[in-house]
Image: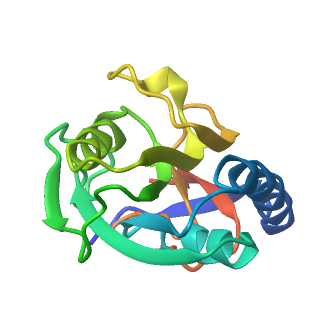
Amino acid sequence: MTDRTYVIDEMISAKAIAARIEALCREIKAEFSDTDKLVVVGLLRGSFVFIADLVRELDLPIEVDFLEASSYGNAMESSREVRILKDLRAAIEGRDVLVVEDIVDTGHTLSHVTRLLQSRNPKRLKSIALLDKPSRREVDFKADWTGFEIPDEFVVGYGIDYAQRNRNLPHIGKVRFTD
């Protein structure tokens, strides 16, 4: 838990997020139009709001699963050590898989998870991130789809937290510390 005081300035509105999700889902539906069932894998915990809105918008046969990976804990900076805290429940061999991430920062988490899932021999493996901070990238990795590219700012809301706070904001906000 943090004792620092801060304010949150809106960066991306709930309305802009909803519109972008609609556009992304059209592209995803086109990519996976021939699927028997798309396994949508949400990376917990930050992606849970994004994955909920995404799957409601996708007009495809869907199965949802979750994987929890951590490289932050309660810190503002990545430790660069990715740990799998919760693995998938179902096998993905021979299946279409879409990995859903809240934010790609250094790239370590999504790169690690993608390699792990690729080793399980899915039919097709694609990734989507709501937010991308390319200026922070340390690993050569880019999601197949990105909602918004943002500058190097610490953000919260729409499932993304700071020390387990602010996940419930309907928008993406920039954290500005006041102390």
| Spot occupied by residue 67 in the image (x, y as percentages of width and height) | 29, 66
Q: Nearer the viewer, residue 61 or 144?
A: 61
On screen, residue 168 versus residue 148, left or right, reads left
> Which colour scheme appears in the figure?
rainbow
- Residue 134 visible to an observer of this rendering: yes
Q: Nearer the viewer, residue 1 or 46?
A: 46
Q: Is residue 54 above or below residue 136?
A: below
Image quarter of residue 69: bottom left
On screen, residue 178 versus residue 57, left or right, reads left
On screen, residue 80 versus residue 99, left or right, reads left
Name the residue: 68% across, 71% down: 60
| Spot occupied by residue 52 in the image (x, y as percentages of width and height) | 59, 77
Q: Is residue 12 above or below residue 170?
A: above
Q: Nearer the viewer, residue 106 or 40?
A: 40
Name the residue: 86% across, 66% down: 15
- For the image, the number of numbered tags is 0
Q: Is residue 78 above or below residue 38?
A: above
Q: Nearer the viewer, residue 141 or 131?
A: 141
Q: Is residue 73 above or below residue 151?
A: below
Name the residue: 25% across, 38% down: 115
| Spot occupied by residue 136 in the image (x, y as percentages of width and height) | 43, 26
Q: Quadrant of the N terminus?
A: bottom left
- Residue 2 visible to an observer of this rendering: no
Name the residue: 18% across, 41% down: 79
